[in-house]
Amino acid sequence: MRHPARLGIAALALALASAGCSTATGGSSPSDTSADGTAAKATTVSSCGRELSFAKAPRRAVTLDQTSTETLLELGLQNRMAGTANLKTKIPERYRDAYAKVPVLSPKILTGEQLRAANPDFVVAAEAGLYTKDRAGTREELGALKVPAYVSAVDCPRRNGSGRTPFDLLFSDYEKLGQVFGAEDRAAKLVREQRAAVADAAGTAARVKDRPTVVWLYSALNGTPYVAGRTGMPSEMSRIVGAKNAFDDIGENWPEVSWEKIAERNPDFIVIGDLSERGRPGDSASEKRALMEKDPVMSKLAAVRENRIVEIPGIEMDPSVRTVHALRLLADGMKDLGHAR
Amino acid sequence: MPADRISVRPAASAGPAASGTSAPAAVDLLRPAARGITVTAATPPAGSRAALPRPVLVLGIALVLAASVAASVRIGAADVGYADVGRAFGVRLGLDVTPLPPLADSLVWDLRLPRVLMAALVGAALAVCGAVLQAVTRNALADPYLLGVSSGASTGAVAVVVLGVGAGALGVTGGALIGALVAFGLLLALLRRSGPDSVRIALTGVVVGQLFTALTSLTLMASADADTTRAVTHWLLGSMAPARWESVAVCAVVTPLGLTVAWLCSNALDAFAFGADTASSLGIGVRGTRTLLLVVTAVLTSVAVATVGAIGFVGLIVPHGVRFLTGPRHRVLLPCSALVGAVFLVWTDALARSVLAPRELPAGVITALVGVPLFLLVLRRRGAL
């Protein structure tokens, strides 16, 4: 499921970006601070209701989850990071070298003490829920310590720009982070690439016959199916490629439903999340297929009988820098299944 | 009368009876019930070693507590030395010391110190609530959560976290506090007609708790995703991590007040062991005292649960362990329970943040893991096992 070509491009981009980065920070050699501090330009970005000001580009950023870690690595910022935390699954091949350069502060959720001990000058999280008193500390607390705390626009419930798709929000993250780190070019390039990938997938929609319905089966832990609801990225991805998420009536990201409910919706095809990296029972795509073939109700569904199934890495179904890859797999899958010409 | 007491707390009474000679003299002195049984064995040391009176015992545990607090301030994610603590204090006292770097200062002053103090306060509150409720309900299995306040707290917290009810204004702590007080209000309303009879308190508390547990599960199942569920579950297990000076201040006001009220009711608590009839024949206003004590324990527990979650085990086992040391008289049992509970939670929290570092464990997990062997050790040494 890896894409060698893309990987090569990414690696190249990463190398370029890190090269650019080391020149940008210029005197990153021991004798730095004053020269560097005055050279870097001050900037302010808004993040989920808070204005974050930077006198100079951060040099000790800490990421609180894998999604933000990968975003910063994609932007080639590993030399500006003081640590990462909260790894959900494996780091993809193309980030592995860069990831190895950054200390892992905690494999799990970072605590306030650990965060402060890392002496960060910037904190980035994809989930707002990581900024609580029993975790990293609130954004207000960190703000008072002059440590700006960034939350992805995707997980900002108060986001006011209605009509903005999750992809738009992701792209706004890239641009803001690029601005903060003085890596605008790299960020603009990433936005361009991903926007093109979204447009490419949207091209599929024009060639789709009668809007097929799809069920996204994310996880079947303990035999209970978790599917994509209306608010998550999969619903948006379905819309982009001209399909309809069968569980758009549930206003949650990953609601827990029953096999009977899935059968009742009788989708034209099923997307299953491959979580084999997580490795719990029922996580791999083949186990999910077997579960559905064994289930008395599911096995009678046309989608299951005729094997109208698309496999997508589960981790890519949530909004992150890797999501465009899932979008492409979805568009390709629909072509293979004959839903699009 | 001794027979009655034995039937109430068999474990507590069996101890000194079986090991009267090896026990410190104070134990038998404080336990008239037990003295009747082992009078010959206990009297000689009681005469010669009356030098270990209650104040000495209380003072001794208080010193242990102070040492524990001092020692555990250093334990955690980053190495914090006494010099660092001194600098953090010195700067705030306006002394001429070099301030710590802002983040290190925040680690020590905003997180570590409140956390250790919070553990001491909550440990004390829970242990005393446990001791009081064990006496009021005459049930050795009573703990601070018997009244259903922790279930109410979790419902309130879940309502805030999951449903977003008043999330901005209240926060999790506020939601939990309101939930706990609502649950307790319901308990009082249910007890209003029957009066606070010991069995009814226990049963009604269990019923109220079950109701709110079901509401919590319902809310979680109906509308939470996996991440929210995990966050709430972690909170329910209890952790000192959210402690800050504001919450410490609330506990530092409420806890001593509550403990004092409970301590002033010591005689009534002793009398409750013999049943409501005997207690009232001793001139104790059973109904009023019980209600007062229920209110006190509910408020103490609510404040603790709202801040740091439902930390189990402390309130159940610490009073039993301390009873072995001090005997069942509440005048000594309560202060000693408070101190031992504080020491216990200070250390379990220190373990929680260091044993699997960099991961942090919920303190509620550690309390039982550490407490069970400790308690079995106490039982064994007292010859009760």
Image (cartoon, coloured by chain):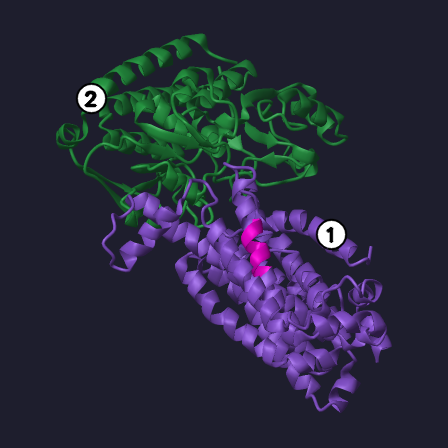
Chain colours: A green, B purple
Task: Write down the residue under mark 2.
Answer: A24
Left or right of B383: which side holds B378? left
Residue A176 quadrant:
top left
In the rendered structure, does residue A206 fall within the stretch colored magenta? no
Mark 2 burial class by Cα count in 10 Å: few <14, some 14-19, many 20+: some
| Magenta region, main secondary structure | helix
The quadrant where residue B379 appears: bottom right
Determine which quarter of the picture holds residue A118. top left
Looking at the picture, tell me which residue is in the foreground, B230 or A309. B230
Residue at the (41%, 8%) spot, across then down: A5
Tag 1 residue: B377
Q: Are marks 1 and 2 on the same chain?
A: no
Q: Nearer the viewer, residue A80 or A248?
A: A80
| Three-letter code for the amino acid on which mark 2 is drawn | Ala
Residue drawn where x is 36% and y is 32% of the image: A170
Residue B74's spot in the image, x, y percent? 45, 46
